[in-house]
Amino acid sequence: MTVEYMVLGVVLIVMGAVQAWLRHGPGAKELDDADRSEPRSRGARSGRAWESWTAILGGVGIALGIVLVVLGVLGR
């Protein structure tokens, strides 16, 4: 087993889970509702595109973490 891969994989899994929880958890719905109630300016639309792009990062982090843990267990 490669301990470094396993440690990095666990860190990525935890970070991805926290990011997904912050994005889709109970507090995110309240913030999203508050955002929708305010009128948006032209510059705010680019921020919305950034938010939608970063929404996938939790899942990507978890997937890469799992790959690293598997590689660590296999000893590669």
Image: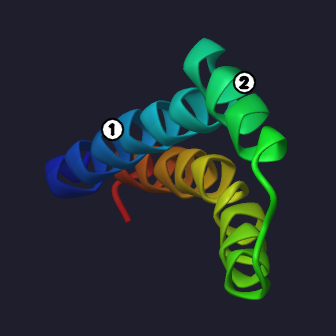
Looking at the rendered structure, the secondary structure element under dot 2 is helix
- Quarter of the image with the C terminus in it: bottom left
Judging by the rendered image, the residue that carries numbered circle 2 is: 29
At which x and y percent is residue 58? 59, 48
Is residue 66 placed above or below 22 in the rendered structure? below
Q: Is residue 17 left or right of residue 76?
A: right
Give the residue type at disc 1.
Val
At which x and y percent is residue 40? 79, 66
Q: Nearer the viewer, residue 12 or 19?
A: 19
Judging by the rendered image, the residue that carries numbered circle 1 is: 10
User: Residue 19: which disc?
Assistant: none
Report the number of discs.
2
Which residue lies at the image location 76% right of the left edge and 77% below the top edge? 41
Which residue lies at the image location 63% right of the left edge and 20% below the top edge? 25
Looking at the rendered structure, the secondary structure element under dot 1 is helix
| 3D distance between C-alphas at marks 2 and 1 | 27 Å
Which residue lies at the image location 81% right of the left edge and 39% below the top edge? 37
Is residue 16 placed above or below 47 in the rendered structure? above
Of badges 2 and 1, nearer the viewer stands 2
Colouring:
rainbow
